Image: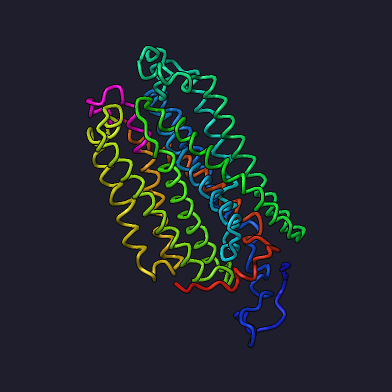
Amino acid sequence: MSHAAVAGHGDHHGHDAHHGPDPRVLLSRENIYLPEGAGKGVSTILLGVGAVCIALTVAGAVVHGPKHALASYLVGVMAVMAMSLGAMFFVMSQHLINAGWSVTIRRQAENIMSLLPFAVALLIPYLIAQLLLPDDMKLIQWMRSDMKGDYLLQKKAPYLNEPFFVIRSLLYIGVWLYLCQRLWSHSVTQDRTGDRTETVKARRMCTWGMFAFALSVAFASFDWLMSLDFRFFSTMWPVYIFAGCAFSSVALMAIVIAVLRTMGRLTGVVTQEHSHDLGKLMFSFSVFWAYIAFSQYFLIWYSNIPEETAYYLHRREGGWEVLSALLCFGHFVVPFLILMLRKVKQSSLALAGVGLWMLLMHVLDVFWIVRPMVYASAPADTSASGVAVWLDIVAISGIVAIYAGLLIRKVASGVLIPLNDPRQDEALAHKNYV
């Protein structure tokens, strides 16, 4: 269905007396576009705050050492990258199953996905630093020259070596950027031309794209997060990281959509029915994350292999046990109990509130993975874990602030829904029966 610029008939709510909502009103420019310059002031403030925080992070690297600063920086980078990767998964999955209900919310997933190049641009300096810094400043332990004699590292050397690491990293980045660019191109080209074959092309690309996405995310999670402690190993690790990606992306989508609806946009286009389904996804991925996290912990506890249990033991001392307990309750129990309520799932504002909490838990989850590695060589030094908390705050906040500022500009720069999608009628008439 092509985009109707203005309303012609129906009442002031956009309803035809006999046929329900009038698409010409629902798809009016005033409903699916933001005013020119919308959000620019907030975006500029966020970008400015982010730039100041990054500058303070650099200063902190001088005062407290680059290892700590890089760890805090990596937490922010991987947190925002997970949001964009999760949004890419959402877009591809909706194309693959030919979903109609999600068409009117898909553009916000595409906007979040489109910031993946920004996350990649932030990651590259970190990777270069790991390759070039002296041994005592490296966060990735297996890259240290004094670790080359380690028995386990020698067994893993065919995989854990710098040249192969660089090749793999470039491959992951190349796959993601290609998928991101093509998915975005198909969507906006259909906006402009009305060519319905763009939907078919996108779905065909996702048949192999989802496979490439799954493999690249799995091995990237090994290389950039799990191999920080090269002795640790878990075959469930990629699924754990993917669960965090999906968990955080739907939470961010809920926040963006709630803000747009509060601004008077998407009225009748994104309804209580869409919020209900988005709430179901938030609930599902919170349970999925908890299931994978517990299963991984349980299997490692049961097998009791020292190289694996050391990873969790290190996070049960020096103050990290508080964060571990917080994640159990905050990342699962709290959203689980709240999202069980139908009224919460049907309210975009309530979902946004839960989404903010979920994003905080997501960042803390990445923090729990990365930051203990700063003092992994001396786990008994409990006092060190509390050093320079301000550096953690400014590094993570800086990256998140810049990401949020860019996302606001991206959302405001174009139409708020995919235009001319052949499944648009289904999305506009969507209704839950469960």
Would you identify the image quadrant in which residue 26 lies? bottom right
Q: x and y percent of residue 195 in the render?
A: 76, 59
Magenta includes 391? Answer: no
The image shows residue 327, relative to residue 27, as above or below, that is: above
Q: How many marks?
A: 0
Q: x and y percent of residue 4 in the render?
A: 72, 70
Quadrant including the C terminus = bottom left
Quadrant including the N terminus = bottom right
> Residue 279 versus residue 363: which sits nearer the camera?
279
Would you identify the image quadrant in which residue 15 lies? bottom right
> Residue 350 versus residue 149: which sits nearer the camera?
149
The stretch in magenta equals 368-387
Q: x and y percent of residue 133 in the render?
A: 46, 18
Side (left or right) of 303 relative to 348: left
The image shows residue 256, relative to residue 266, as above or below, that is: above
Report the residue at 66% width, 84% height from top: 10
Report the residue at 59% width, 52% height from top: 110
Magenta includes 371? Answer: yes
The image shows residue 70, relative to residue 297, as above or below, that is: above
The image shows residue 246, relative to residue 61, as above or below, that is: below
> Residue 67 versus residue 198: which sits nearer the camera?
198
Q: x and y percent of residue 78 in the render?
A: 46, 38
User: In this view, which residue lies farthest toward the front?
Assistant: 303
Side (left or right) of 137 relative to 417: left
